[in-house]
Image (tube, rainbow, N blue to C red):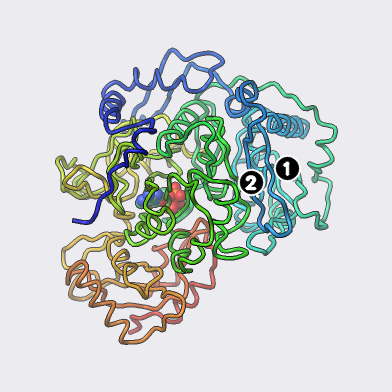
Amino acid sequence: MPKTYPPSAKTAARAHITAENYGPMYEQSINDPDTFWGEHGKRVDWIKPYTKVKNTSFEPGKVDIKWFEDGTLNVSANCVDRHVETRGDQTAIIWEPDDPNTTESLHITYAELQVHVCKMANILQELGVGKGDRVVLYLPMIPEAAYAMLACARIGAIHSIVFAGFSADALGARINGSDAKVVVTADHAPRGGRSTPLKSNCDAALLHCKDSVKCLVVKRTGEQTTWTDRDYSYNDMRLEADDYQKPEEMNAEDPLFILYTSGSTGQPKGVVHSTGGYLVYASMTHQYTFDYHDGDIFWCTADVGWVTGHSYIVYGPLANGATTIMFEGVPTYPDAGRFWEVCAKHKVNQFYTAPTAIRALMGAGNEWVEKHDLSDLRLLGSVGEPINPEAWNWYNEVVGKGNCPIVDTFWQTETGGHMITPLPGATTLKPGAAQTPFFGVKPVVLDPQSGVEIHGNDVEGVLCISDSWPGQMRTVYGDHERFEKTYFGDYAGYYFSGDGCKRDEDGDYWVTGRVDDVINVSGHRMGTAEVESALVAHVAVAEAAVVGYPHDIKGQGIYAYVTLMNGQVPTPELRKELETWVRAEIGPIAKPDLIQWAPGLPKTRSGKIMRRILRKIAEDDFGSLGDTSTLADPSVVDDLIENRMNRN
Ligand code: ATP
Ligand code: MG
């Protein structure tokens, strides 16, 4: 049995949710959602209180999701105004720049935030943006990104954020896709010591958009940019803009934002989130999963270009009156100690990042962590991919010094907030498992072929959710049919996550990876995550990605791409050793048939491995790699094709 970690007495004593109240609360959330959410919906301020709570259907052809449908509210009033009355001088946002040696960090109070948001709202209105209009944000991680999100929410406009690392083409497609009226961008985006010319990317994108689209430009570096008739200067306009703007009264079901998924499995989807249900869910998960308390300093290292940044940098924390950190940089700049330096500098209490970053920093060596005072850390979080036990243990021991519970949060762009996650005061942690459903979430395991629900414990299948929760996406922008087909088309009556999972003997959930990634070796179905975890557990291995490829005898063979730790040399002996290692760790069936040394792996810009591309390479089919527009570094793919293993 691998080691498990019950909540410490100290953690449990402070926690909002404990082993005692989790059970009854969860039962009520499932058996009587109207009462449960009717009560918890009050955590946000309503202009007109709701009288109806849940009105949802997963029925084929009639999928329809409404929560709090007759209530009205404003998200920016909830994230800003209501705190100005009670904690106006408290810091709302700490901004930490890319380069700490040339730029100071900023502290923005709730009172200041209100002025910034109102000015931005007035500027957008002046540019012709009104309720229901779409605004694309293509910005660095600067406070203006949060101002713009909240300004849209204030006037009832729908924002669609495009990660600043995306190309002009990807930006243009998203501007046209949502028929946006305005794009908000900046001159340049510094990141990791390099600078992306956002404004000129934007110019290139706008060549393919309607002439009427306006461009609002925020000054970040002050570098010269071209200027056309459609461009407006945020910094000039804000001098004249009024510093108050009344929040628009919005219906709970009015869309708050559109956001495209990361594109790991295919064409990105324009996910639409609501105003009321989303805010209730984002704020509640933020408070309970991270056991957030007043006065805590919360840091989520994501970019606002991803849903994690929406829910856990901006909407969740600010709805809860938290101090949230916005970090412009990358984990390894100016050096591999940057995350820990920022934690020490701002006395961070809760720290939330992705396995890809944890693995990279683990590879860089413990000395980078040990240099910094991390004594304020109380909790660590992980999101984006399954976290390998090896990385979990390192995070726990080296970063958390054994004192910080780790919450491995499973969720998706589509779910708005955490779905399956430990709760720090209630859950006995198991490294590598997401474990327990959040309130209102009813996970089920289905047989992938028959779609029949598998009951009991110690079972495996596909992960579906059998009823709606408030943070659920409402539709695919402009294409409700695609929404139904993508998420409800495979298993009638269920929301299908696309992921495989195990429910272990204790009833805890382990997400085993995307169903598309499951391999079938001689009749044994295997999640790629398991083989990858075994490889990463070897001292020489920094990262691994596993896919299936056609194999004459076994049906599918195991093809492993392996990135070695700094300083390790790839040799035939090491290859043999890794094969033996996996065989010993999991069993003979899991022994990789082919191991390719991979100096880098193809990843989305949010850091997830794109196994579908690796699969194509393993299958010798690289004529049709599919949509690669969300790939972070396309050159990685060429190298892998060049050096592929199963050349006939
Ligand atoms: P696309 O849907 O376009 O293929 P994507 O699924 O990568 O892209 P996201 O919504 O960013 O887009 O990611 C959600 C997915 O990330 C989940 O379906 C799951 O595969 C994975 N994931 C996220 N968190 C975890 C976690 N804690 N454990 C395991 N897997 C996770
Ligand atoms: Mg997905």
In the image, residue 226 sits, relative to residue 471, either above or below, namely below
Q: Which residue shows up at 55% across the image and 46% down it?
A: 347
Nearer to me, 631 or 565: 565
The number of callouts visible is 2
Q: CA distance from mark 1 to mark 2?
A: 9 Å
Q: Which residue shows up at 36% across the image and 86% down it?
A: 571
**Does the Cβ of the disc 2 residue fall within 8 Å of ligand 1?**
no
Quadrant in which the N terminus is drawn: bottom left
**Can you name the residue that lies furthest to the bottom here?**
572
Rendering coords of residue 500 (x, y %): 28, 51
User: Is residue 206 found left or right of 523 in the rendered image?
Assistant: right
Instruction: Return the residue at label 2.
Output: 175
The local secondary structure at tag 1 comes to loop
Rendering coords of residue 210 (x, y %): 71, 45
User: Is residue 78 found left or right of 540 in the rendered image?
Assistant: right
In the image, residue 85 sits, relative to residue 207, either above or below, namely above
Instruction: Return the residue at label 1.
Output: 213
Q: Which residue shows up at 16% across the image and 64% down it?
A: 523
In the image, residue 98 sits, relative to residue 507, either above or below, namely below
Q: Are marks 1 and 2 in contact (CB under 8 Å)?
A: yes
Which quadrant would residue 99 be assigned to in this image? bottom right
Which quadrant would residue 39 be assigned to in this image? top left
Rendering coords of residue 626 (x, y %): 46, 62
| Other residues around mark 1 within 10 Å, as few (<14) / some (14–19) / many (≥20) | some
In the image, residue 53 sits, relative to residue 448, either above or below, namely above
Mark 2 residue type: Ile
